[in-house]
Image (tube, rainbow, N blue to C red):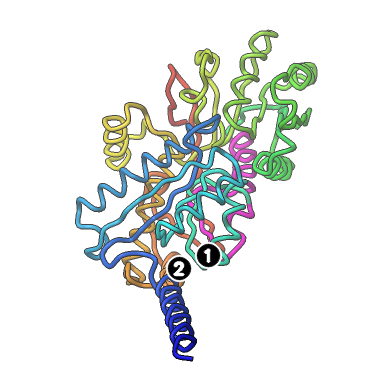
Amino acid sequence: MKRFNKVVSVVVASAMVMAMAGCGSDANNGSADTYKIGGIGPTTGGAAAYGLAVQNAAQLAVDEINAAGGVNGYKLELNFQDDELDAEKSVNAYNTLKDWGAQIILGSVTSGCCIAVTDKTKADNMFQLTPSGSAVACTQYENNFRVCFSDPAQGAASAQYIGENGLASKVAIIYDSSDTYSTGIYESFVNGAASQPFEIVTEEAFTADSKTDFSVQLQKAQDAGADLVFLPIYYQEASLILTQANGMGYAPKFFGVDGMDGILTGVDNFDKSLAEGVMLLTPFAADATDDLTVKFVTSYQEKFGEIPNQFAADAYDGVYALKAALEKSGVKPSDSVSDICEGLKAAFVEISIDGLTGAGIVWDAAGEPNKAPKAVIIENGAYKAM
């Protein structure tokens, strides 16, 4: 009988310890003096130019903030995980970061992966800020915010920019119908073009299974007399389109969006001279002469050996936006993940930051930023503000 009571006592005590540990985990996944930020994005594979840019710039911002005294006296710590542009691996990365004690998520970098993670952060009520996930569903929950423009905003702004600046009279579109990012921008571009002084003459799609040969799409654009080809796609496919257009003697203007950023650095064996004259909508121009951009570009180039792209700028602004929101909210690293999330949600709609990607950037309760779009053109192998 004594032996039975002893066993019961051990079981009850163990259950109490586990319950207390569980409560402790919910109450505080961090440490007393450090905010733990988990980053997710592709640092290997075909989209590594995006993920590495975000990782590098985020770490640069974290280091600067810590060197300047931190956030309300507390430090920031960044742990960045590779998702290889795979949604399932992005969720695995989130689980790894959760085990590490992440209190805030910066990511994921790409839309499909970001959407997969939103269900997890929603369930845990963890604040999620994506620097570059532009699909509408990336901010589908109240705890999801972004730094970049949404797909509809990019498409509509591109149509407006092309029309208002008289860049073309006939436009062809080549897009990836199997990709949420690409189709979202394509659809909003078509809607926006209806009020602009140019004609869309061809709308040609490809899929993930047919993204190496673009001869049919390019031939239709050429036959229709398109003097500009709009490419709401990623830089890997864009590099093939530029190469194949050159091979067939077709030389229209090419206009892309943020997915094009990386074409100068992310494609092996690509003749970068073929990108001369390519334009893309972006909120960041590395050759801008304002003090913040000059400081950022210089620091980034010294540390990582290359010119930062838009993804880097969005990530850098994202970390500084988190700093401003953490300061505004007054939440502490010892607070629960949920309490930190609630504090950041309330603070984000009240802060305004002067960042690399815009002056006076503000956010609405839907997680969307408000800032002015810009465009750049590739000249002499570098991005130049238009």
Horizontal and vertical percent position of residue 260: 55, 31
Q: Is residue 19 left or right of residue 251?
A: left
Q: Circle 2 is placed at which residue position?
A: 341
Mark 1 element type: loop
In this figure, what is the number of numbered marks?
Answer: 2
Q: Residue at x 37, y 29 (%)?
A: 307
Q: Is residue 46 left or right of residue 291?
A: right
- Asked if residue 86 lies left or right of residue 266, the reply is right
Q: Tell me which segment is drawn in magenta.
A: 136-164
Which percent across, then down, holds residue 380?
A: 43, 16
Image x and y of residue 359, in percent: 39, 50
Could you tell me the amino acid type at mark 2?
A: Cys
Badge 1: how crowded within 10 Å, few (<14), some, or many (20+)?
many
Q: Is residue 19 above or below residue 85?
A: below
Percent x, y of residue 13: 42, 82
Residue 151 located within the stretch drawn in magenta: yes
- Residue depicted at 47% across the width and 52% down the height: 96
Q: Up-down: is 190 above or below 262?
A: below
Q: What secondary structure predominates along the stretch shown in magenta?
A: helix
Which quadrant of the structure image shows residue 243? top right
**Pick the front one: 317 or 279:** 317
Q: CA distance from mark 1 to mark 2?
A: 7 Å
Residue shown at 28% from the left, 33% from the top: 303
Q: To which quarter of the image does residue 248 belong?
A: top right
Relative height, residue 135 to residue 332 (above, below): above
- Reading the image, the residue beneath label 1 is 143
Q: Amino acid at mark 1?
A: Asn
Nearer-N-terminus badge (1/2): 1
Q: Reply yes or no: does residue 173 show up in magenta.
A: no
- Marks 1 & 2, CB-CB < 8 Å contact: yes
Q: Nearer the viewer, residue 15 or 47?
A: 15
Q: Nearer the viewer, residue 34 or 248?
A: 34
